[in-house]
Image (spheres, rainbow, N blue to C red):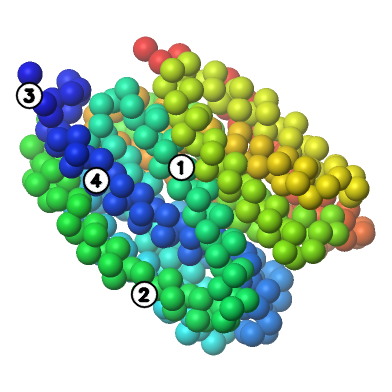
Amino acid sequence: MPENNHDATHPLLPSKKIGLLAFGAMLLLYFYQQTIENSYAPLRPEIAQDLGLSTLQTAFISTAFLIAFAVVQIPAGLLIDRFGTARLLPVVAMTTGFAAALLSKCDGFTGAIMGRALLGAGAAFACPAVAAITRRAMPLHLFALFMGIADMVIGLGGVAGVWGGNELQAATNWRVALKIVAIVAVPLALLLYLYVPNKWFGATTHKKAEGHKKLSIIATMKDLFARADVRVACLIYAGCCGTMCGFGGMWNMQLAESWAWKESEAVFIASSFFVGIAIGSPLTGWFGGKFGSRGTLLASMSITLPAFIFWLLVPTDWPLWFDAMNVGLIGAGLSAMALAFEIAGRSLPPERVASAIALVNLAGISAGALLEIIPGLIANFVNASPLHEMQLANGVFVLMLAFTVWATLKVRPAS
């Protein structure tokens, strides 16, 4: 048997070395995008002050990323399934760098919205591309593990964005910080061009691998929605990713500050959330491959939900390290969200996976966009103390975690 035929469902597989290099290059792009996205939390106060923005306006700027991410998600998945990742990814990297540069030069609310929206549009390609490269380059039984490893980058990018953004802002200012990260796009695009070769990850490979007629956008969506695995994966990811985006993207740090932690301490706590995701993602991916996605998700939620409720109600006299560990535990449990991708793609051929992952991502990021705004509306309309307002605002995430448990119970055992 040829070396590169290590799974019957993959008619054309590159060597393991080529596959791992392509996967690694893709992870660097994923990390880059996550770092820029999450740097907004520590940069937000200075941006608001410099541009004269209200708290609600800064929330809308943050949400612009998620709205653009959601709008572009389906086209991104379809483009990747049709044309492969080889030539698309360098363009995505340069677009991300350009968006960071555009944001650094904005002079008002509209410019900031445009910059964040372009960042979201570029980021929409990341997760479908990871899934497409993984299914094209790795054996099927390792899909959950490698998607878990990819989701680890969400945690690492979160830490780099929150901590690095805070440090860069302190050393310079928010505009210079964004200009620095924009420059990184150039060598990254070159790296992707070299290590995601067109021979294995381009349009020609996808055409040879397809054993059926290409479907239109509407027909593709109908075909995916007709699959129970895809539908339930969308529900699970909406609960988990919505919580991660809304809570981790903004409201976690706000809650920490409401508990009277200083800004530097709140940054430390917010970073611990992404450390938990980074540590938990490969572990939950491995457990999902070994013990099944349904059981692993339920076990993870049984940890996350109590830990979240505790963080919401924890008294102020707990030490900083304890709060950080508790928030890290929440992130570790939420890392199991990557298993929604395995659930969605388990019965699909490789040339449908990117579209399915894009659909699942759309559900999660749409929920995330709403969950960045809803807590702000709750806090604005509730007449209570600042701490009580923030507790009520973050209470919406408890409902989302309970919803995730309900959705996970609907997962059918893998055949």
Count of marks overlaid on the render: 4
**42 to 284, vertically: above or below:** below
Callouts 4 and 2 close, C-beta under 8 Å: no
**What percent of the width, then of the height, locates residue 204?**
8, 46
Please, what secondary structure does the residue beneath circle 1 have?
Answer: helix
Q: Earlier in the sequence, mark 4 or mark 2?
A: 4
Nearer the observer, 67 or 257 = 257
Judge the density around disc 1: few (<14), some (14-19), many (≥20) Cα neighbours within 10 Å: many
Instruction: Report how far apart the C-alphas of labels 3 and 2 lie in the structure.
Output: 42 Å
The disc at residue 151 is 1
Instruction: Report how far apart the C-alphas of labels 4 and 1 lie in the structure.
Output: 17 Å
Q: Would residue 275 be found to the left or right of residue 133 on screen?
A: right
User: Label 3 amino acid?
Assistant: Pro
The disc at residue 21 is 4
What residue sits 33% from the left and 44% below the top?
130
Q: Earlier in the sequence, mark 4 or mark 3?
A: 3
Instruction: Report how far apart the C-alphas of labels 2 and 1 lie in the structure.
Output: 24 Å
Nearer the observer, 282 or 50 = 282
Q: Kindly identify which residue carries mark 2.
A: 183
Q: Kindly identify which residue carries mark 3.
A: 2
Please, what secondary structure does the residue beneath circle 3 have?
Answer: loop
Q: Is residue 181 visible?
A: yes
Q: Earlier in the sequence, mark 3 or mark 2?
A: 3
Instruction: Report how far apart the C-alphas of labels 4 and 3 lie in the structure.
Output: 20 Å
Nearer the observer, 386 or 348 = 386
What residue sits 79% from the left and 50% below the top?
320
Q: Earlier in the sequence, mark 2 or mark 1?
A: 1
User: Label 1 amino acid?
Assistant: Asp
**What percent of the width, then of the height, locates residue 157?**
49, 54
**310 to 50, vertically: above or below:** above
